[in-house]
Amino acid sequence: MKKLIVTALVAALTLTACGSGSDSASSTLRVGTLSDAPPNIFLSGGNYTGFDNELLKAIAAKQNLKLEFAATDFSALLGQVASGRYDIASSAIAQTDERKKTVDFSAAYDFETMSIQAKQGTPVTDEKALAGKRVAVIQATVGDHWLGTTVPAAQAVRFPDYAAALTALKTGAVDAYILDQSIAEKNVTDNPDAKLVVVKSFVTDVPHGFAVKKGNTELLGKIDTGLKQVISDGTWLKLHQQFLPTAPVPAGFQG
């Protein structure tokens, strides 16, 4: 009887160990992203796509990782990664010192280029002209920080997502909008009746990175290794040309 019990226990432990390894190998990583910020991150035909998401998919393919995407508000995204709700954040996230206190970042896969957007006929010609104006920003983004430090006399109107901020600009609820250059340019193309213009664009030295929970060095290592692979084989450049054709290509990303 004792022999039977021991044999059963050994078999159960063996099955558990095998099952655990199998689950680990086939586990799906949850990716938090946005649905409304093209061309970097957006939802099209039920598929989460855009430069950042397609780049992450290419990295995952190189490293045999399975991904599952879901949309959230940008202002909540990093906190959700820190709490474990998402394994990875993919959202053209600028790596600031403040954000590094909450999450760990991958190696840089692009750099932040910002724009001031307004409507045709606007008196806003540059950042100095934003003083005293109502200016839309996405809460907790580089644009939000930039406006507060560069033009403190402007009235920041914070929104949780890009669609709401764009609506405010189109309806005249705000005078200008600070956002990523690529999204600003697409707003002009996609909304011809709104008569939007890009007043001014400027490149920053702030890198974009995929975010993971602090201390998850294994996942971070796989993302960084996969990123090197997709840069080396030309995938990065191909995706950049597809989604961000007018944006500058940083040094070292030519493949």
Image: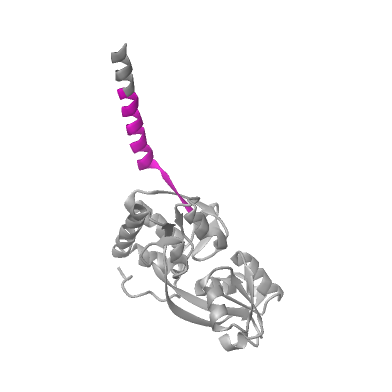
As for residue 26 lying within the magenta part, the answer is: yes
In this rendering, is residue 54 above or below 140?
Answer: above
Residue in front for this viewpoint, 103 or 34: 103
Q: Is residue 253 left or right of residue 51?
A: left
Quarter of the image with the N terminus in it: top left
Residue in front for this viewpoint, 139 or 1: 1
In this rendering, is residue 136 above or below 89?
Answer: below
In this rendering, is residue 215 above or below 124?
Answer: above
The quadrant in which residue 123 appears is: bottom right
Residue in front for this viewpoint, 242 or 171: 171
Task: Name the residue at 33% across, 70% down.
Answer: 253
Q: Position of residue 223 (x, y in %)?
A: 35, 57
Q: Which residues are magenta?
A: 10-31
Quarter of the image with the C terminus in it: bottom left
Q: Position of residue 107 (x, y in %)?
A: 35, 65
Task: Name the residue at 38% across, 55% down.
Answer: 215
The quadrant in which residue 147 appears is: bottom right
In this rendering, is residue 148 above or below 38?
Answer: below
The colour scheme used here is one colour
Residue sitting at the far front: 2
Q: Position of residue 139 (x, y in %)?
A: 58, 68
Task: Name the residue at 38% across, 38% down.
Answer: 23
Q: Position of residue 5 (x, y in %)?
A: 33, 17
Is any atom of residue 126 visible in this view?
Answer: no
Q: Main secondary structure of the magenta part?
A: helix
As for residue 11 lying within the magenta part, the answer is: yes
Q: Is residue 157 left or right of residue 219?
A: right
Is any atom of residue 95 visible in this view?
Answer: yes
